[in-house]
Image (cartoon, rainbow, N blue to C red):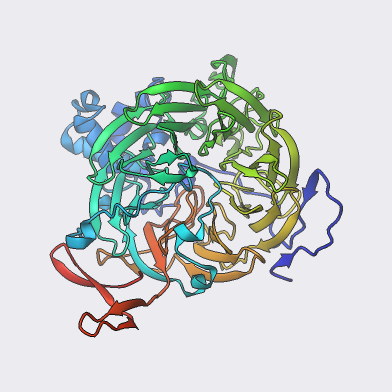
Amino acid sequence: MTRISVAAGALLSFLVVQALPAAVPSAPAGSSALKDVSELDSRAHTSDPEKLPGAHVYHGVCANCHEGQVPKAPHKMFLQMMSADSILAALTDGIMKEQGAGLTPHDRRQVAEYLTGAPLDANKPRLSPPRCTGEASRFDEAQAPVALGWGHENARFTPEKVAGLKRADVPRLELKWALEFPGAIRARSQPAIAYGAVYVGSQDGTVYALDLHTGCVRWSYRNSAEVRTAIVLETRQTSGGTNSTVTGISRLFFGDMNARVHAVDAKQGKALWSVKVDDHPNATITGTPTFHDGVLYVPVSSLEVTTAADAKYECCKFRGAVVALNADTGTVRWKAHTITEEPKPVRTTSLGTRIFAPSGAPVWNSPTIDAKRGVLYVGSGENYSSPANDRSDALLAFRLRDGKLVWSRQLLAGDAWNVACMMQNNPNCPDENGPDVDLASGTILDTLPSGKEVLLAGQKNGFVYAVDPDAGGNVVWKTRVGRGGIQGGIHFGMALEGHRLFAPISDLKDGHDGRSYDSPPRPGLYALDAATGKPIWSAPAEDDCKGRRFCDPGISAAVTAIPGVVLAGHMDGVLRAYDSETGRVIWKYDSTREVRTVSGATAHGGSFGGPGPVVRDGYIVVNSGYGLYFHMPGNVLLVFAPPQRIAFQDTQSKNCRSMSFARHARIGGTSRSWKAVF
């Protein structure tokens, strides 16, 4: 079968709803059911966690609060997402100090290891990455932050002037350096590049500032919870528009798994402020906060969708939200919920558990700012409990100045779902039983050649939409490009080059949701005309998994475009570069191979999920590893650049000659050579 199908000049007449024909791999239409939520963790456990010494301590002391009995206590499933040393710190001298006082130091250690399934020393690096000294430690003010990508806008297109790469450079890319995240099985924070540094968060909560050229550590900042969002560097807009920036302010922002937003000095790595944006015990921040005009707009989601798998848990009381914070102080300016009504008891399950509604409609994506209309746009996810209401799977426009809801447009009605629905006969599953097809990726605002503006959105049901922001979100066109499903369709982010929209499709072969589908999966990358929704080309994903566990060919992670190229990390662990005109793969790199990291230790990547590549100053920087929800674990940050030559001037002869050279830097007291990529 033909790998790439490029649209011919003559297409069928345009329909409001279009289906994109594509060659697809054969796959079973049904999915297996989930037996236990522990299956969502892709770690290879060497023993039954319930046989660990800490199990007795947990069930005797902790379970009475952390299995749904105390409203403000995070559920056990939430705690299992944390690192062992973070739990120990909370019990020893943190928020749980009072409760931990009745435990011996040995008991506290054992319960932390039981909850996380990992020994306390798992996060300790086998070899520490080198610290920067000399020139490598200096922040370059000339390389100021630019207002591109998550945290600023969602088009995920980097122009050549910023990217420092041309299409011709991409086939020559090579790995320059890699960083290991010790003890991690996932790497879900999108990096940011500025001041000659790479900023990135990690599973154990550490945020790093790394020298872009060598990977040495300029500073590190330890947060108490996983950093899943992108790192957002503060910019100042000028009259030239939202992409014209100057700097001088050296702050960065990020959100963590405990629903806290942090501001840190980008040059020193010192905490400036921290604020919790939601008091629900299982609230979290998945989408990246968006910075605009001195304000951070923070999307709020929740892991209560997983907690509901416990049939004794009273599902559900969380409501999605957007919170506006003063970027200088962290002060809350306003908070707007996706669901206005507070949840109330609506029924009792066969086990006697109360069910609350309406709930859910989390915001998994980074808000899109529309300064001209004075609003921001987000997409919502499913309701967590029945009955579903009109705010799930919807696009919502909130007013920037006060959070007032301007309009909402539901794109799929009747979607109520939680993880209980992946299990057989769990009474916490809503009557609707899904289909759990969130609007999870960030929206993109595009001005068409006609001058008309449309808002572009992708959904987990495999549809891409254009809606009219001036008409309450009325649908202009919609095109189906994927089969869709709980782990299908469009997950984390599309990209836009000119008016060519690139839609990555996940479509797992087996979503482990117990569902049957009426068509095979369509994993791959698809290009559409943003004005009409008409297909331009399709690139079905090649299946190179060869039976590897947790391997799938599709694209869950956000994609990134530069002129002539689309960069896409697949769930098979391969980073691919596609020609944006044709969809042909022009370069690829298997991140699952072991690599030598800057510390000297070896590590490997896994499935790409969540964040996409970041491109600046001739470098491509991307995280690899997503050891959750049936994806391959991994724990590396990878940095690529093409080999290059520079002009060298002989100070005596004044003659310039081209030569390759090595950059030498004294790092951590040791002289190391690094191949130049300037």
Q: In x, y percent, where is residue 652?
A: 20, 83
Q: Residue 21 sits in which quadrant?
A: bottom right
Q: Is residue 655 left or right of residue 479?
A: left
Q: Furthest residue to the left?
A: 669
Q: Residue at x 74, y 36 (%)?
A: 475
Q: Is residue 343 left or right of residue 393?
A: left
Q: Nearer the viewer, residue 335 or 504?
A: 335
| In the rendered image, the vertical position of residue 642 relative to residue 26, given as above or below | below
| In the rendered image, the vertical position of residue 311 relative to residue 523, given as above or below | above
Q: Residue 232 sits in which quadrant?
A: top left
Counting every numbered tag in the picture gives 0
Q: In x, y percent, where is residue 66?
A: 37, 27
Which corner quadrant holds the C terminus?
bottom left
Q: Is residue 455 left or right of residue 192?
A: right
Q: Residue 3 sits in which quadrant?
A: bottom right
Which corner quadrant holds the N terminus?
bottom right
Kindly tell me whether residue 514 is visible in this rendering. no
Kindly tell me whether residue 150 is visible in this rendering. yes
Q: Residue at x 48, y 30 (%)?
A: 304
Q: In x, y percent, where is residue 189?
A: 41, 48
| In the rendered image, the vertical position of residue 605 relative to residue 173, given as above or below | above
Q: Residue at x 25, y 46 (%)?
A: 267
Q: Furthest residue to the front?
A: 654
Q: In x, y percent, where is residue 283?
A: 44, 30
Q: Nearer the viewer, residue 453 or 91?
A: 453
Q: Nearer the viewer, residue 449 or 546?
A: 449
